[in-house]
Each structure stands twice: as structure tokens, then as C-alpha cells.
Image (cartoon, rainbow, N blue to C red):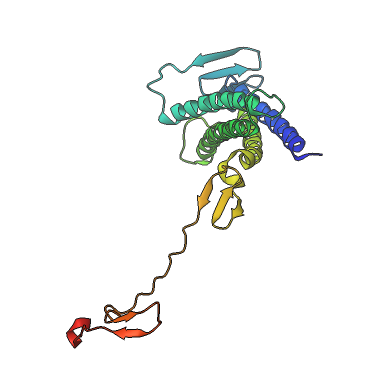
Amino acid sequence: MKYRTVVMYMEIGCFVSCLCGWILVCSTLPTEYWTFSEVGSIVLTTSNYYSNLWRDCISDTTGVSDCKDYPSMLALPAFLHACRALAVCAVITGFFGGVLTLVGMKCTKIGGSEVANARVTFAGALTYLVSGFCGMITYSWWANKVITEFLDPTFRSQKFEIGAAVFVGWGGSILLLCGGAVLSFFSGKEGLPFSNSATVPRRPGTYVTARTRRTYMLPAASSRVTLGPPLFYEGRKLSRATGVTRKTGATFSRDSFV
């Protein structure tokens, strides 16, 4: 099997994994079971309290349930605003990651050259990683707050436990992180400039890179010039015809060489 075929199947598997993770993350936003608590009031009646990022709900064994949105947005704690922002960022970045990956995959053949498609796929993989990190931070932060309040003996308000939506969100975030990491490895290996930067010698003093095809000239070695003492041979003339050295009338003193 060719390497390109292996990479194509790997991209398809990572895309399916990230898509499933994104769907799981999206499904947790409208779900009310982020936290829940059971309070037994009478022998035959038990009240169930559960809530999420947007509303509080209550139900009992008689089948009566009621949900109420948070009355004031400005009165909410900063923790809840941060969780809302991170959850929405996870959904948005996951959507754009799916679009970029779908355009750059080898099996779709929508983009241009192989290098351009690999770079688009790499951008989609990074977007998937951002989505996975946002989701993981959201659910871990929420679960940490619930566990801290539940184990705190000085906390006198009603205590809650971790709901099913948090576990579903953890699973979706892990799928996003794993699929994005594998996808970024294979696409970055092909699309990034430094992944194929081996130099191939063409002629002495010249090298060309396999990716950019740019020629770099090595600096030539500086030639050495041997200089004799000045004015040393000025008083003698060599006759090319006879090959006899003749003395000239010029005389030199010691100061002439200083």
C-alpha cells in the first residue's frame, strides 16, 4: 500500500473521530444534567434538582418537572460566564475545523496542490485541537467546582454531583484532541516547509533545498597574497634579454625601509 493511500485513510479516520467528538460536545449544551441532586421529602416523593449552563430544573416522582432560566445575566458569577464562553468557542472552532479538514483532505480533491491541501488540513487539525482544549477546560473546571463544593464541610448550600453531560463532554473532547493530534502530525509532516529541508549538493560551493529549490552559494575562500618588503628590489633591475642583474645608481639608507 502506498504512503499516500495510508495517509488518506488516516485522514478519514481522524476526521470521523473529530466529527463524532464535536457532535458529543454540541449535545451537552442543551442537556440539563450537568449537575444533579436528589432530596427525599416524603416517603413516596423525591425531588430531583439538576442544572446546566443556562437554567435550573426540578422534577419529582409524580412526573411534574419545571425549568427556569437564570434571571439575571449580570448577576451570574464569572465562573459561569467563562464556562459559557469556552463551550461556545469549542463548538465554533470545531465547526470551522471540520470545514478546513474536509477541504484539505486527499480524498475530497477540492484544493490545489498536495502541499496546499496538506497545509489546509494542518490548519483544520490545529482548529480541532483548540476546540478539544476549550471543551476539556470547560468540563474539567465545572467538575472541579462541583467536587470541591461537595467535599467542603463548611459549604452549607445544597450540594450537587457531576451529571452525565460532563462525562459525555469529556469523551467528545478526548476524541477531538486525539484526532486533531494525529491529523496535525501527518499533515504537518507533508505541508510544513521544514519537514523536507534536506540539502542536495549540485556542484562544489552550491546547495539547493529539496523543498524550496533555492540555490545558496557558499562564500569563496579568500585568496592569500604574499607581500614582500617594500622597496627591497627597487634598486635592482633584471634584464630579461641577458638575464644579468644590473645595479642602479640609486642608493638607500637605513631610513628608506622604515
Q: Position of residue 196 (x, y in %)?
A: 61, 46
Q: Position of residue 62 (x, y in %)?
A: 66, 13
Vertical placement of residue 58 versus 13, above or below: above
Q: Look at 38% across and 84% down and name the residue there.
A: 244
Q: How many marks?
A: 0
Quarter of the figure with residue 250? bottom left
Vertical placement of residue 70 versus 183, above or below: above
Q: Position of residue 91 (x, y in %)?
A: 56, 24
Location of the N terminus by quadrant is top right
Q: Nearer the viewer, residue 148 or 80?
A: 80
102 relative to 159 in the view: left or right: right
193 relative to 183 in the view: left or right: left
Q: Position of residue 118 (x, y in %)?
A: 63, 34
Does any portion of residue 24 appear in the rendered image? no
Q: Look at 22% across and 82% down and name the residue there.
A: 257
The residue lying furthest to the right in this view is: 1
252 relative to 211 in the view: left or right: left
Q: Nearer the viewer, residue 47 or 251?
A: 251
The residue lying furthest to the bottom in this view is: 254
Does any portion of residue 43 appear in the rendered image? yes
The residue lying furthest to the front in this view is: 241
Q: Nearer the viewer, residue 202 or 87?
A: 202
Location of the C terminus by quadrant is bottom left
Vertical placement of residue 257 versus 213, above or below: below
